[in-house]
Amino acid sequence: PILLVKPTGADGKPLESVAVSGRYQNTTIGETNRFEPQKDGRHRSWQLLPDEPCMITVTASGHKPQASNIWLAEGATSELEVKLEPR
């Protein structure tokens, strides 16, 4: 599966210095998923495991981090828009 994460500020505008990570909730997997920044401001998952719950965390300088739980089936593509609040 592919997850595209679109981080924005509370005003809906793109943010700079954003980090997106994913951590599987099944502790026996023990992997952290990485995300690659795209030219359009979104971040694309890299080798996300299907059918496994994953906590996606988005952080940006000067903003409160936000986490979301996702679960995607094999072959799925999804987009997650995350609005970060200022600190």
Image (tube, rainbow, N blue to C red):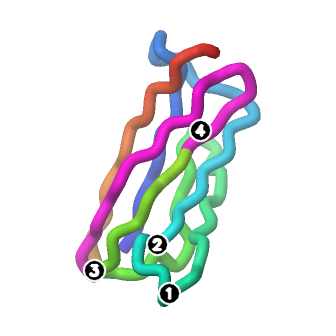
Which label's residue is closer to the chain start, 4 or 3? 4
10 with respect to 51 (left or right): right
Is disc 1 surrounded by few (<14), some (14 to 19) or many (20+) residues within 10 Å? few
Magenta span includes 23: no
| Circle 3 residue | 51
Q: Nearer the viewer, mark 2 or mark 4?
A: 2
Type of amino acid at the residue the image marks with label 4: Gly
Residue 41, label in figure:
4
Which label's residue is closer to the chain start, 1 or 4? 1
Type of amino acid at the residue the image marks with label 3: Asp
Q: Nearer the viewer, mark 3 or mark 1?
A: 1
Which label's residue is closer to the chain start, 3 or 1? 1
Q: Nearer the viewer, mark 2 or mark 3?
A: 2
Q: Nearer the viewer, mark 1 or mark 4?
A: 1
| Circle 2 residue | 24
Residue 30: x and y in percent read 57, 82
Which label's residue is closer to the chain start, 2 or 4? 2
Residue 35: x and y in percent read 60, 60
Q: Residue at x 60, y 72 (%)?
A: 32
Q: Residue at x 65, y 51 (%)?
A: 37
Q: Residue at x 31, y 57 (%)?
A: 78
69 with respect to 66 (left or right): left
Is disc 2 surrounded by few (<14), some (14 to 19) or many (20+) residues within 10 Å? many
Q: CA distance from mark 1 to mark 4?
A: 29 Å
Query: Which contiguous range is marked in magenta?
Result: 58-74
Q: Secondary structure at mark 1?
A: loop
Type of amino acid at the residue the image marks with label 2: Tyr
Q: Secondary structure at mark 4?
A: loop
The quadrant of the rendering that contains the C terminus is: top right
Q: Secondary structure at mark 3?
A: loop
